[in-house]
Every structure is written in structure tokens, then in C-alpha cells.
Image (spheres, rainbow, N blue to C red):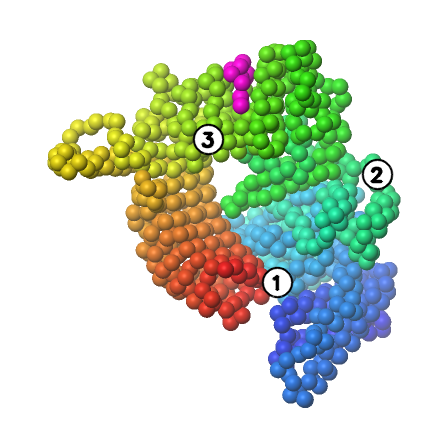
């Protein structure tokens, strides 16, 4: 071993020992932040030591270069550690060890000396060396040391992804012990960084006998890659090279292949290295979403810097030049990190950086990426994917597009291929297309629902600009998206003051073939609605828009629809959400091809009976305004049989449930509120006399004598209970349900009975929201195991719900809201709620005690406790929930002092009163 290497090895070992001494001695009086930093420092130095040993074994020409850098940073660290130890010892001799002054803080000293920056720079260089083209093997990590929970400056926001993928890799069964996961992303999205964090995870190191890492390159053959894996396995396991692959299959090992380019590489790996009966697991990084069937990680970018609004806007424009690619954003941040924060300096640096990158002003960083994806994508339906992608151009830049809106638009526009004989609904095909575009990193997730599904999404701005720039010129207009842009050809036609019938020729020239019309005019006042009405009326009179399939006016204030809208007989999508529209034209009854009618957040009170004759697949009603559902016409027949979504339905005594709504059995998303009307409204249906009727007769006599309305009250209550029973029986038949929301209220709006029946056969139900008094706690045991999100409110449960819900294997979000539980104690048993990420406990006014046993809530990230006045301390055992990142306390007893509790180390606490 070379003398220089011995010196570096000895120096690093000595510094690691000193760091460890500081960590293990009580006299250091370290705070949590300092302790975490020192643990990270210890791990980084140990990793560098192993890297040097690897370079020496491989006789690398880079050995001397890395030795010099690592030696310098190790000696600097040692000087700071020595100074810190002497300072603390000096204060101890003076019996001042109870407190430490600010200058004693080792974290401050390490940062002032730029030790952390230096270590991060070396780590960057090591990572680039490991992943360089032409080099397949690298040093293998097989230690069981502690690791820093995040990589400063290198990667942000991967903590949830690391935990998710770690759980998948470690949660294998005896029936299928092999786990195969791919991390999909375009170049620069942090795939290698995420894989590195997983490799360095302490649980991963403990869970696998050996970890083999191979940096792949498109220039290498499959045979060359297998040979390098064999060499790496030989070094780790000490076996003969010709038997190393077989030896890998004999133990539980993790094989990481960074940069898999084609499915052929993956097929060769899984064929050569044993079979599915072995315990080997694979973690692959690739830009090709079709390498294996699985789909995994997403990248999140975190920003936590406060600046003046002017500089923030400028910063956004500069970062936009990176096209949403984290690797370019990282390079940009390093380039700007030590420069003055002024507008002039940033503009100058932007130009310099663009020149250094070789981009130039006109080149879009997504061009090469998109071309690579097109060439790699081998699905025959890729043309349909491009059509789906084109719909994103209709929305304004940075607009969070609701997934439900996209899916409905794609289906209405026949964008996704679907055959009548297929059992899979077109909505599911569209949802799959959206997931595939996300897997290809062409679409970014803006927000997820608690159940894990996509809520809103968007295109990266640079990709949107690229798609807009590639749009063919002088083509006929098929889609109109009014964003109040004066440069749009339709701006004057919609918002100008000169529109008259004499414009008919011009209108026909532009809008004869239009298939989709969307408006994003969110101005206040009556003008937006009036301008839309005038434009639509004039176009239809001019025989324009007659091919229209989509009319989406979501967010336009009161857009009065013209009566001649009946001529749009091909209309499939009518979006009026958040328009506060008060009425629909009577001619709406002619639009029998409608598939989606969105009336959420409108003031529309009644629906036309022709709705039973439409081809509706999605119907959103105004729950708060109690939109009335009309009775089913006798001649309607098997109508609305394809209805997938019925949301915001209001049920009272007159709603046509029996023989009407209960015939709709293909519903996937159902939201119902039932509430009895005022006592003056009498039941309209007479039934055969029963014991209750006799009682009603007696009360009728009293009514005549006393002048009361008791007869009406009892009759109305009986009718309403019958309606509720009909709704509950209907829900039992809806075995395709995915989302269910039920709210039960009495005539005065107070929570009322919710007599739910068993839902165990609802295997697809993933989220459920229940407001109302459950008849008994045991009904919770009849919930389906597929549940991912559950909200209970006013359930008045007397038994601890944690003891009944604990074994739901997929539950990720649980909200126990007002009066959902009226007991005094909650207990989370060991091993309970293994997948729960979010837990909210609100307004449980009787709750006094909460116990969390060890290994309970093993995945919890967010805990919110609100308005539980009898709780005077935090849950006993909260310290066991090591994964907790956010603890929010709102309107809680002032007796709760968070500093008196052992809070998990990485948890941020927010207290609001």
C-alpha cells in the first residue's frame, strides 16, 4: 500500500474516531441539529475512505487527485474538532458546562470553514466519477454505518421516495421474494441521486447481504455489463468470477444498475442471475418507462428562500431557462451561489451561463430529451399520447390542470383509443395515458390527493413552449383557448366591440371546424359572461362551432348560454363549474350526446327530465345549492347506464331513488348528501297501513285537537328513513365504486343517522368520507381492505376506532374529525397502520389519553391534532414514530409544552392557537 494512501487512510480514520467520541460523550451537550450534522460528517468521511481504497485496488489514475482533496478536508475537520473539544473541556474545568456559548457551536464552525461545502463538492465529483461513461464498475458499499438523512444541496425532496422504494425493496414475500423496481426519468432529473440515497439507507444496508452497483453505458453490450457485475461480485464475496453470478443468487442481495437503456438489458440480467425463487432484488434507473412494467418515483423540487418579489420573478424566469431539469437547476444554483443578489448581476450571469452551457437563447433544453423519448417509446399508441399532450397547450402556463378535467376532455375528444367491446371504461384508459406521460417526465404532478392519485398536473414551461413553437402554421383552427391574450386571433372576435352579423364570413373562415372551446376569462363582473354569450350566439347563427365537442367555461362568471345552443348536437362536454350560473336554457334538453355535465358551484336548482335520455358518463351537481334530480320518465328505458360519476347528489323525500337512481350500477365515484325538508312538506306516496299508520291516525286526532303538525313530522320522517334505506341498498350494489362520500343531516342540518351496510365486496373502493352517526362501531370492520383514504365525522363511535381500523393494509390517510369518537382514550398498537402517512385528529372533545406503542405508525409523516381540549399532553410514545416530519397543533391546551416531550428527531412543529 502506498505511503501517501496510508497517510490519508490514517488521517481519515483518526478524524472519524474523534467525531465518534464527540457523538458518544455527554459532555459535548450537542443539540439535535449538531448531532445530525456530525453523524453525516462521520458517514461522508467513511465513504471517502472506502472510495480511496477502491481507487488503490483499481490502480486508478485519479487516486492522487482524490487523495489530495480528501486529505485537505479531513485535516481541516480535525482542527475544528480539536478546537471544539478543547473549548468544551476548558469550560468544564471552570464548571460552566451547563451552558455553551454561541462560539462553541460546532455546526457554526464547520460552516464558517466551508467544511460542509467542501465535502459536498467532493461528493459531487465522486458521484460524477462513478457514473462516467465507459466505466461500469465502482467501489461497493457493504458497511452498516449511520447515514445523514438527506444530502444537502445535492438533492431535495426525496425523503418520501426513499421511504417508499425502501419499503418496496424490503417488503417481499416468501411466494415472490424478488423485487424489481425502476426509477424512470429524463436526463438530469436526479435518478442516480435517488438511487444513491436508497443504497446508503441504513435499513437497506441491514436488509441485504451485499449491494452491487453498476453504472451502465449505451456503448456497452449486455455481455460486458454482466462481466462487470461478475467482477464486482467477486470483489465483494470473494468467490471465483465464473461462479460469482450464481453466488449472487444464493443470498439476499441488491443489484443496482444505473442507466439501463433498453428492455434487452433488463431481460438479460433477470435471466442470467437466477430466477424468481431467489431473493435478489433489482433497482434500475432509466429514461425508458417501458423497461419493466413497474412505475415508481417522482421528483420534487424544494425551494425555501425568501427574496424581494422583483427578484423572485426574475429568478423564476432564469430557472425557466433550465426547462424544469433539476440537473441544470443545480448547475445554475452553483454558478449563482457566490454572486451578488441584484437584478443587473443576475441578468448578466444568466447570459454568461447560457453561453457556457452552449444553449443559446433560441434552443430549448427539452428538444433533445423529447426526441430521445420518441425514439425509445415503442407503444403503437404513441400518436395518441402526443394528442393527449397537445391538450396541455390549451391551458395557461403554470396552470394546475385538474386530472379529472383532462380525463373528461380526452374522452370527449376521442383522443384515447377505445373499442366498444372492451370492458375497461375509456376513463381508465385515459388515466393510464396520464400516468404514462408522468412516468416519461413529460407531465409534472402539481398536487396529489391524500389517496395518492393525481389531483392537478402541468407541463414544464419549456416543454410547453417547445410544443407551441412546433405547431403547424396556417392550419385550420380546431381548438380555441381564450386566455385574454390580445395576440390570439380570436381575441377581437370574443372581446372586441365591432362584432356584428356582418362578421359571419370571417367567423366561418375561422371557426367552422372548431372541436373544442375553452375560456379562462376569470375577470369579475358581468362582462365575461356577456361576451361569451354574444360570441357563441353569433358563431352559431353563422353556422360555426356546429362540430363542437367540448365547451368548457369553468370559472367564467355567469356565462349566459344562448338558446340556439341546441344546434350543437355533437357536444359531449359542458363545463360550467365555478360559474355561479343561475339557470340553463330550456334547449339544453336537445344535447343528448353530452357525456360530461359539470354544474358544481352553480346556482342551478333543477335539471331537465331529458337528462335521463343523455349519454352522460360524468354528472357533477351543486351540493350546496341542492340541485334537484328529476323523476325518471316512463319512456326513458335503460338510461344513464354508462354513468361513471355522480357527485353532489342531494336526496330528500322526493328524489327518485327506488326504481330510478338505484338502477345505475356502473358508478365509480358517488357523492351524496341526504337531508329531510321542512316539516310542512308532506310525503307524496301513500302506502298500506301499518302500526305506524295507526299511530299516525291517533296523532291526527291530537293534531286536530291541539292544532299541531305531529302527523306531518312523523310521516315525513318515515319517508326519509325509507329513502335512506334505498340509498344504502343501492350503494351495496355499486361494486365498481372507487370514491364514496356520504353526508347525513336532519331537517335542521345537524348530523343524522348513517345506517351503512357491509362494503367488504367493494374491492376497488380507495377513498371514503362519511359524515353522520354510525349505528355501531363494528361497521368499521366491514370496510374494504382496499381503502387508502378515510375520513370520519360525527360518527359518535364509542369504541376506539384505532383498534378496528389498524389492520387496513393500504390506508395512507386517516382523518378522525368532529365527534367521530366520543371515548377518552386512543391506543395505536404495535405494527398497526403500517402504510399510514397522514393522521388528523380534530375536535374529539372527550379525548384525554393517547398511547402509541413501539413500531406503531411505522410510515407516518404528518400528524395534526386540533381542538381536543381534554388532552393535556402529547401522545405517549410519540418518540417511537421516527418517520414523523410534521406535527401541527391547533387550539390545544396551553398545558402542552412541546419542549417537555421527546419529539422524533426530524420533526418540524407548528403550534397555532
Compare residues 611 and 170 and report the one nearer the observer: 611
- In the image, taking residue 630 as reference, residue 279 lies left or right, namely right
Query: Residue sitting at 46 percent across and 30 percent down?
Result: 603
Distance between the alpha carbons at the discs numbered 2 and 3? 49 Å
Q: Is residue 566 magenta?
A: yes
Q: Residue at x 43, y 48 (%)?
A: 791
User: How far is disc 1 from disc 2 in space, using C-alphas?
Assistant: 45 Å
Relative placement, left or right, of 348 versus 701 is: right
- Decide: marks 1, 2 in contact (CB < 8 A)? no
Residue 560 image point, x, y percent: 53, 23
Q: Earlier in the sequence, mark 2 or mark 3?
A: 2
- Asked if residue 546 is positioned above or below residue 36 in the image, the reply reads above
Identify residue for label 2: 361
Classed neighbour count for the residue bearing mark 1: other residues with Cα under 10 Å, few (<14), some (14–19), many (≥20): some
Question: Of the residues under marks 3 and 1, which one precedes in the sequence?
Answer: 1
Identify which residue, 692 or 422, lies in the foreground: 692
What's the magenta region? 560-570
Name the residue that disc number 1 marks: 202
Q: Please state the horizontal and vertical placement of residue 702, each as a whole percent of the image.
A: 13, 37
Q: Nearer the viewer, residue 472 or 224?
A: 472
The residue singled out by tag 3 in the image is: 603
In contact (CB < 8 Å): disc 3 and disc 1: no
How busy is the neighbourhood of tag 2: few (under 14 within 10 Å), some, or many (20 plus)? few
At 35% across and 23% down in the image, what residue appears? 631
In the rendered structure, which disc, 1 or 2, sits on the residue that comes first in sequence? Answer: 1
Amino acid at each position: 500500500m502506498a505511503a501517501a494512501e496510508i497517510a490519508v487512510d490514517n488521517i481519515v480514520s483518526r478524524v472519524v474516531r474523534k467525531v465518534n467520541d464527540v457523538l458518544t460523550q455527554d459532555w459535548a451537550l450537542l443539540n439535535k441539529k449538531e448531532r445530525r450534522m456530525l453523524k453525516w460528517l462521520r458517514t461522508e468521511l467513511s465513504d471517502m475512505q472506502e472510495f480511496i481504497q477502491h481507487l488503490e485496488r483499481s490502480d486508478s489514475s485519479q487516486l492522487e487527485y482524490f487523495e489530495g482533496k480528501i486529505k485537505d478536508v479531513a485535516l481541516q475537520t480535525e482542527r475544528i474538532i480539536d478546537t471544539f473539544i478543547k473549548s468544551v473541556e476548558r469550560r468544564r474545568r471552570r464548571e460552566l458546562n451547563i451552558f455553551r456559548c454561541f462560539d462553541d457551536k460546532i455546526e457554526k464552525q464547520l460552516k464558517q470553514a466551508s467544511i460542509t461545502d467542501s465535502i459536498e463538492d467532493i461528493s459531487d465529483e465522486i458521484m460524477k466519477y462513478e457514473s462516467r461513461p465507459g466505466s461500469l464498475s465502482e467501489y461497493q458499499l457493504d458497511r452498516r454505518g449511520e447515514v445523514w438523512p438527506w444530502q444537502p444541496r445535492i438533492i431535495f425532496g426525496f425523503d418520501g421516495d426513499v421511504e417508499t422504494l425502501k419499503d418496496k425493496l424490503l417488503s417481499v414475500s416468501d411466494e415472490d421474494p424478488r423485487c424489481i423496481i425502476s426509477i424512470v426519468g429524463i436526463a438530469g432529473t436526479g435518478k442516480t441521486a435517488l438511487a444513491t440515497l436508497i443504497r446508503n439507507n441504513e435499513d437497506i444496508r441491514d436488509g441485504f447481504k451485499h449491494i452491487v452497483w453498476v453504472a451502465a453505458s449505451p456503448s456497452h453490450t449486455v455481455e460486458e455489463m454482466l462481466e462487470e457485475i461478475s467482477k464486482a461480485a467477486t470483489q465483494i464475496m470473494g468467490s471465483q468470477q465464473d461462479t460469482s453470478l450464481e453466488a449472487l443468487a444464493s443470498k439476499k442481495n441488491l443489484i443496482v444498475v444505473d442507466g439501463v437503456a433498453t428492455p434487452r438489458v433488463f431481460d438479460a440480467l433477470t435471466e442470467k442471475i437466477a430466477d424468481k425463487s431467489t431473493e435478489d432484488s433489482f433497482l434500475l434507473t432509466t429514461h425508458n418507462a417501458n423497461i419493466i412494467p413497474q412505475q415508481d418515483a417522482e421528483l420534487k423540487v424544494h425551494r425555501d428562500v425568501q427574496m424581494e418579489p422583483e427578484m423572485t420573478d426574475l429568478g423564476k424566469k432564469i430557472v425557466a431557462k433550465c426547462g424544469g431539469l433539476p440537473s441544470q437547476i443545480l448547475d445554475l444554483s452553483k454558478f449563482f451561489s457566490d454572486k451578488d443578489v441584484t437584478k443587473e448581476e443576475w441578468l448578466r450571469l444568466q447570459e454568461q451561463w447560457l453561453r457556457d452551457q452552449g444553449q443559446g437563447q433560441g434552443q430549448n433544453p427539452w428538444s433533445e430529451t423529447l426526441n430521445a423519448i420518441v425514439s425509445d417509446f415503442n407503444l403503437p399508441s404513441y400518436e395518441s399520447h402526443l394528442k393527449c399532450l397537445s391538450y396541455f397547450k390549451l391551458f395557461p402556463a403554470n396552470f394546475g390542470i385538474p386530472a379529472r378535467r383532462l380525463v373528461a376532455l380526452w374522452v370527449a375528444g376521442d383522443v384515447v383509443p377505445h373499442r366498444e367491446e372492451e370492458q375497461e371504461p375509456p376513463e381508465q384508459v385515459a388515466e393510464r395515458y396520464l400516468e404514462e406521460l408522468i412516468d416519461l417526465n413529460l407531465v409534472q404532478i402539481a398536487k396529489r390527493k391524500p389517496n395518492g392519485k393525481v389531483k392537478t398536473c402541468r407541463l414544464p414551461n419549456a416543454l410547453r413552449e417547445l410544443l407551441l413553437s412546433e405547431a403547424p402554421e396556417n392550419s385550420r383552427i380546431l381548438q380555441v383557448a381564450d386566455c385574454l391574450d390580445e395576440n390570439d386571433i380570436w381575441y377581437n372576435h370574443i372581446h372586441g366591440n365591432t362584432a356584428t352579423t356582418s362578421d359571419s364570413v370571417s367567423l366561418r373562415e375561422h371557426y367552422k371546424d372548431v372541436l373544442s372551446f375553452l375560456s379562462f376569462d376569470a375577470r369579475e363582473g358581468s362582462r365575461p359572461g356577456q361576451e361569451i354569450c354574444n360570441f357563441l350566439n353569433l358563431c352559431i347563427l353563422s353556422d360555426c362551432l356546429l362540430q363542437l365537442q367540448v365547451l368548457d367555461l369553468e370559472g367564467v362568471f355567469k356565462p349566459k348560454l344562448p338558446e340556439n345552443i341546441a344546434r350543437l348536437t355533437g357536444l359531449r362536454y359542458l363545463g360550467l363549474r365555478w360559474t355561479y350560473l343561475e339557470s340553463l336554457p330550456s334547449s339544453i334538453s336537445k344535447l343528448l350526446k353530452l357525456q360530461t355535465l359539470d354544474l358544481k358551484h352553480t346556482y342551478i336548482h333543477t335539471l331537465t327530465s331529458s337528462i335521463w335520455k343523455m349519454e352522460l358518463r360524468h354528472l357533477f351537481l351543486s351540493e350546496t345549492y341542492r340541485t334537484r334530480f328529476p323523476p325518471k320518465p316512463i319512456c326513458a328505458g335503460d338510461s344513464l347506464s354508462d354513468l361513471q360519476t355522480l357527485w353532489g347528489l342531494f336526496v330528500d323525500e322526493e328524489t327518485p331513488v327506488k326504481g330510478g337512481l338505484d338502477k345505475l350500477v356502473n358508478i365509480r365515484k358517488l357523492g351524496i348528501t341526504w337531508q329531510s325538508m321542512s316539516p310542512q312538506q308532506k310525503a307524496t306516496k301513500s302506502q298500506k297501513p301499518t302500526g305506524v299508520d295507526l299511530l299516525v291516525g291517533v296523532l291526527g286526532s291530537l293534531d286536530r285537537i291541539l292544532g299541531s303538525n305531529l302527523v306531518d313530522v312523523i310521516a315525513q320522517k318515515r319517508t326519509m328513513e325509507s329513502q335512506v334505506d334505498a340509498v344504502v341498498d343501492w350503494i351495496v350494489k355499486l361494486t365498481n365504486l372507487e370514491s364514496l362520500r356520504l353526508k347525513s343531516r336532519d331537517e335542521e342540518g345537524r348530523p343524522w343517522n348513517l345506517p351503512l351496510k357491509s362494503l367488504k365486496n367493494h374491492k376497488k373502493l380507495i377513498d371514503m368520507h362519511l359524515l353522520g352517526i354510525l349505528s355501531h362501531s363494528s361497521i368499521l370492520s366491514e370496510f374494504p381492505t382496499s381503502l387508502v383514504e378515510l375520513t370520519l365525522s360525527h360518527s359518535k363511535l364509542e369504541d376506539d376506532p384505532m383498534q378496528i381500523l389498524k389492520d387496513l393494509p393500504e390506508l395512507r390517510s386517516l382523518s378522525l374529525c368532529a365527534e367521530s369518537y366520543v371515548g377518552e382514550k386512543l391506543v395505536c398498537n404495535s405494527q398497526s397502520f403500517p402504510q399510514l402517512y397522514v393522521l388528523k385528529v380534530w375536535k374529539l372533545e372527550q379525548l384525554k389519553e393517547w398511547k402509541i406503542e413501539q413500531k406503531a405508525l411505522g410510515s407516518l409523516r404528518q400528524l395534526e391534532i386540533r381542538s381536543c381540549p381534554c388532552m393535556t399532553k402529547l401522545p405517549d410514545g410519540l418518540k417511537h414514530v421516527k418517520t414523523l416530519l410534521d406535527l401541527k397543533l391547533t387550539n390545544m391546551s396551553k398545558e402542552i409544552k412541546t419542549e417537555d416531550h421527546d419529539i422524533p428527531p426530524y420533526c418540524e412543529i407548528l403550534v397555532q392557537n
